[in-house]
Amino acid sequence: MVNFEYLRRNSEAFLKNAKHLYSIGEYNLAAFNLEQAVQLLLKYVLAMKFGDFPRTHSIKMLIEEVGKECPAVKEIFRENPNAIGNLEAAYIMARYMPAHFSKEELEELMRVTTRLWEALIYCLS
């Protein structure tokens, strides 16, 4: 059996790095790190529930899949579609486009990421 703990560990590291980047005003890279933290934790939950995860970078698609087992995750998406869209866009924008996330946008992404994180951890218990 494959050990997917690396997904959780990397997710935690990205989240920690996002908080550090936020604290020094690097909002674009912080947004990218939040996206990576969420993406990897979603994949971790899917791997733990089903033994594998889809090979995609789409946060929305991963949330849809996790939401089948964890309704709270789907509810967070329904309540925060713009933030989830910005989180998903952060992956492409930070890598390939001139991105600009404001402090306020990043604070919203951090708030939604925290809610997702808590719901995903609860889903595993």
Image (tube, rainbow, N blue to C red):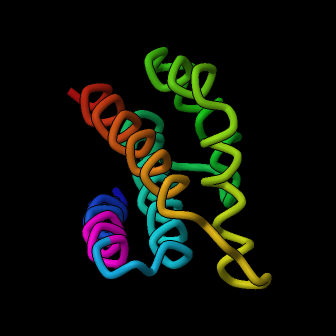
Q: What is the residue that sits farthest to the right in this orientation? A: 97
Q: State the residue in front, 2 or 38.
A: 38
Residue at the image position 56 percent from the left and 64 percent from the top:
102
Residue 85 vs 49, above or below: the answer is below
Q: Which residue corresponds to the image point at 72% horizontal and 60% vertical from the top-left?
A: 89
Residue at 32%, 26% in the rendered image: 123
Residue at the left extreme of this rendering: 125
Q: Please state the horizontal and vertical placement of residue 55, each as a whole percent of the image.
A: 66, 59
Q: Quadrant of residue 34?
A: bottom left
Q: Residue at x 48, y 62 (%)?
A: 103
Q: Considering depth in this image, is 31 or 1 the residue closer to the camera?
A: 31
* Count of numbered labels shown in the rendering: 0
Residue 122: x, y in percent? Answer: 25, 27
Q: Return the x and y of residue 99 as percentages of the image width and height.
A: 70, 76
3 to 75, vertically: above or below: below
Is 107 contained in the magenta span? no
Q: Is residue 20 magenta?
A: yes
The image quadrant that residue 32 belongs to is bottom right
Instruction: Give the dominant element type of the magenta stretch: helix, strand or loop.
Output: helix
Q: Is residue 77 above or below residue 31?
A: above
Q: Judge from the rendering whether residue 47 lies leftward or rightward of residue 118; answer left or right.
A: right
| Left or right of residue 103, residue 94 in this image | right
Q: Report the side of 68 relative to 90 (left or right).
A: left
Residue 111 shows in the view: yes
Can residue 3 be seen at all in this image of the molecule?
A: no
Span shown in magenta: 13-22
* Foreground of the two, 68 or 31: 31
Quarter of the image containing the N terminus? bottom left
* Quadrant location of the C terminus in the rendered image: top left
